[in-house]
Image: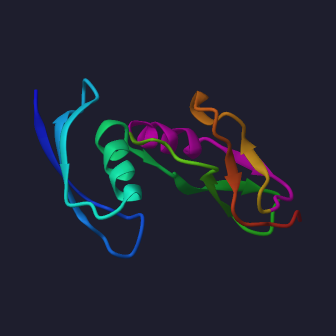
Amino acid sequence: MTTEKKIICIICPQGCNITVKGDAEKGTIESIEGYTCKRGLAYAENEFVHPLRILTSSVKTEGSSAPLVPVRTRTAIPKELLFKGMDEIRGITVKGKVTCGDVIVANFLGTGVDLIATGSVEAI
């Protein structure tokens, strides 16, 4: 079934209003209009067929100088996994010292992407 999706490109400050027509379920695109560069074209194609997002949140700590430490996925994961990811993060507690860049969960949700700390806390 052909659908039309309007996308605002976030690749550069220009913020092109792009219109994509096609069947997202089948991964087919009939037309893309409104982009002004190749990067915008690639962004619109990916956003229509397989949207990705970086998940940012915080996890609980135990025995640390702060009650929470900020985390994010190292790279983008499929948009449809964001709520499942938040449920998973809700159950995570780290202990002691955490340094920015530490891997909190390797291969988060089986995506091949690590969940990493984006802040540091000291052990108490």
Q: Residue at x 78, y 66 (%)?
A: 120
Measured as percent of width and height from the top left, residue 80 is found at: 38, 37
Q: Is residue 90 above or below residue 12?
A: above
Q: Is residue 50 left or right of residue 108?
A: left
Image quarter where the N terminus lies is top left
Q: Colour scheme in the image? A: rainbow
Q: Is residue 67 above or below residue 52?
A: below
Q: Is residue 124 above or below residue 4?
A: below
Measured as percent of width and height from the top left, residue 95 is found at: 81, 51
User: Which residue ends up furthest to the bottom in the rendered image?
Assistant: 13
Q: Residue at x 64, y 33 (%)?
A: 112
Image quarter where the C terminus lies is bottom right
Residue 14 belongs to the span the image colors magenta: no
Q: How many marks?
A: 0
Camera-nearest residue between 118 and 32: 32
Q: Is residue 17 left or right of residue 10?
A: left
Camera-nearest residue between 35 and 24: 35
Measured as percent of width and height from the top left, residue 25 is found at: 24, 26
Measured as percent of width and height from the top left, residue 42 is found at: 38, 49
User: Which residue ends up furthest to the top in the rendered image?
Assistant: 26
Camera-nearest residue between 1 and 96: 1
Residue 90 belongs to the span the image colors magenta: yes
Q: Is residue 72 above or below residue 28?
A: below
Q: Residue at x 55, y 57 (%)?
A: 57
Q: Is residue 123 left or right of residue 77?
A: right
Q: Residue at x 44, y 37 (%)?
A: 81
**Residues rendered magenta in the picture:** 80-99
